[in-house]
Image (tube, helix red, strand yellow):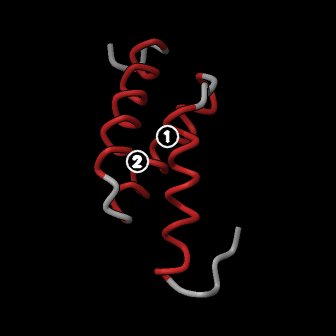
Amino acid sequence: MLVTEGYAAGVPLLKRALGRFCHEEISLEEGLGWLPLACRICADVWDDHSWSVLSARLIELARDAGALR
């Protein structure tokens, strides 16, 4: 989605999207593709809770995929 009203208008939209990533199941392929970007967005909008949850999920998915050997 394109946010044209500026940073302050986009933050609630981004936080809603991050909340869905935190609470919904995600496939291995989608997780390894999208979670690094979602973690970056967490840092940009100062959402420490989501960053903590999503980075832990990303590490778990990477470990399951054998990417951390």
The reply to whether the C-beta atoms of the residues labelled 2 and 1 are less than 8 Å apart is yes
Q: Which residue is mark 1?
A: 35
User: Viewed as shown, does residue 42 lie left or right of 65?
Assistant: left
Q: Residue furthest bottom?
A: 5
Residue at 60% across / 87% down in the picture? 5
Q: Quadrant of the N terminus?
A: bottom right
Task: Name the side, left or right, on which 60 lies relative to 10.
Answer: left
| Mark 1 crowd level (few <14, some 14–19, many ≥20, 10 Å Cα) | many
Tell me which residue sits at (32%, 44%) in the image. 49
Can you give x and y, in whole percent of width and height, for residue 24 in the image?
60, 30
Is label 2 in a helix, a strand or a loop? helix
**Which residue lies under the disc numbered 2?**
39
68 vs 15: above or below: above
Q: CA distance from mark 2 to mark 1?
A: 6 Å
10 is higher (above) or lower (below) than 46: below
On the image, the x and y values in percent for residue 2 come to: 69, 74
* Residue extending farthest right: 1
Crowdedness of circle 2 by 10 Å Cα count: few (<14), some, many (20+)?
many
Q: Is residue 18 or residue 66 the one in the foreground?
A: 18
The percent position of residue 43, horizontal first and vertical second, equals 33, 58
Q: Residue at x 41, y 37 (%)?
A: 54
Instruction: Report the number of numbered marks.
Output: 2
Residue 67: horizontal and vertical position, in percent? 41, 20
Please name the amino acid that badge 1 sits on.
Leu
Which amino acid does the dot numbered 2 rest on?
A: Cys
Is 45 left or right of 32, judged from the image as shown? left
Q: Secondary structure at mark 1?
A: helix
